[in-house]
Amino acid sequence: MRRFELNEISVAALWDEPTGSWQYIVIDRSTNHAAIIDPVLDFDPMSGATATRNADALLAFVKEQQVTVDWILDTHPHADHFSSAPYLADALGIPRAIGANVVEVQKLWRDIYCLQDFPTDGSQWDRLFGDGDSFMIGETEMRVLFSPGHTLASITYATDGAAFVHDTLMMPDMGTSRADFPGGSSLSLYRSIERLLALPDDTVLFVGHDYEKDDRDVQCCATVAEHKAKNVHVGGDRSEVDFVKLRDTRDATLPLPKLMLAALQVNIRGGRLPDPEPCGRAFLKIPLNHFKPPENEAK
């Protein structure tokens, strides 16, 4: 667990190596109240087994630090890991929240998975945040910024000096996240990034993923100023037209995330696994021949 001390908040960051995902505990320093952002449920695609190692590590940390958790927060329905939000919310007896546009993502993926009776009203969460909404973690006000592009539902949680952007930006040497999922848009992604880079230069942007690039250690944050200067996709005042061309060209070569077709049918349910069938076992559905392989594999 890595720890960062900012003005009003402490941030504890836990990295999940199999998915390259960062999970955050945002702690109001004056009250020791907190929120957990984008927690991971362990999933082994070879065996189909789930586990709660990451979530239990988060619970152990808050118990050890005597932190009172007020919220479990998702930034969007993830395509690369299962969410452990329900497990943590049940363990702690607290609400879960996500952006209001999750209902549009639910509608897209309900049709892809042919989930005819699946409710697409966001009722799987306790609160749906609108753009500009705010809520409190102890005495710290958190603001909600819609940041679509990677998905229709992507949002950022921001406070003075910090923002949790998840799959909008990567670390500066890796650029930005892809925008080719159903409902994604490279143009919307660029405009969301412009909004984030309009925050004060010393704002620390905490990302959702990092990987062991060029043998450097994994990292989880960089300032707005660092992204403006060094981000390989948007730094140096790259134009909207140039970014869209770069992002779309790159996305056309990328395979789907390994867990995407498994994860999204769980995460549009708020992280709940499918209900067991009469035999007592639950099953995941994989849509056959719906998605095409990337261009470099199709040739």
Image (cartoon, rainbow, N blue to C red):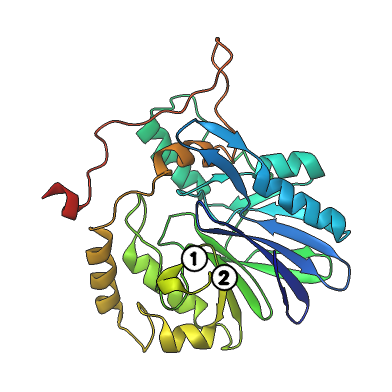
Q: Is residue 118 above or below residue 92?
A: above
Q: Residue at x 45, y 72 (%)?
A: 215
Circle 1 sits in a helix, a strand or a loop, which is it?
loop
Point out which mark residue 5 bears.
none
User: Three-letter amino acid code at disc 1?
Assistant: Asp
Please report whichever mark, 2 or 1, sits nearer to the chain's N-terminal start.
Answer: 1
Where does the image place residue 110, in percent across and percent down from the top left? Answer: 42, 34
| Mark 1 burial class by Cα count in 10 Å: few <14, some 14-19, many 20+ | many
Q: Nearer the viewer, residue 49 or 255?
A: 49
The residue carrying mark 1 is 210
Left of 269 or right of it: where is 37?
A: right
Which residue in the structure is indicated by mark 2? Answer: 220
Say which of 48 and 23 sits in front. Answer: 48
- Within-10-Å neighbours for mark 2: few <14, some 14–19, many 20+: many
- Determine whether the residue tagged by mark 2 lies in a helix, strand or loop: loop
Can the viewer see residue 127?
A: no
Q: Give, as a three-letter code, the residue at label 2.
A: Cys
The answer to whether the residues at label 2 and label 1 have Cβ atoms under 8 Å apart is yes
Residue drawn at x 55%, y 18% as measured from the top left:
281
User: Does 148 appear above or below 101?
Assistant: below
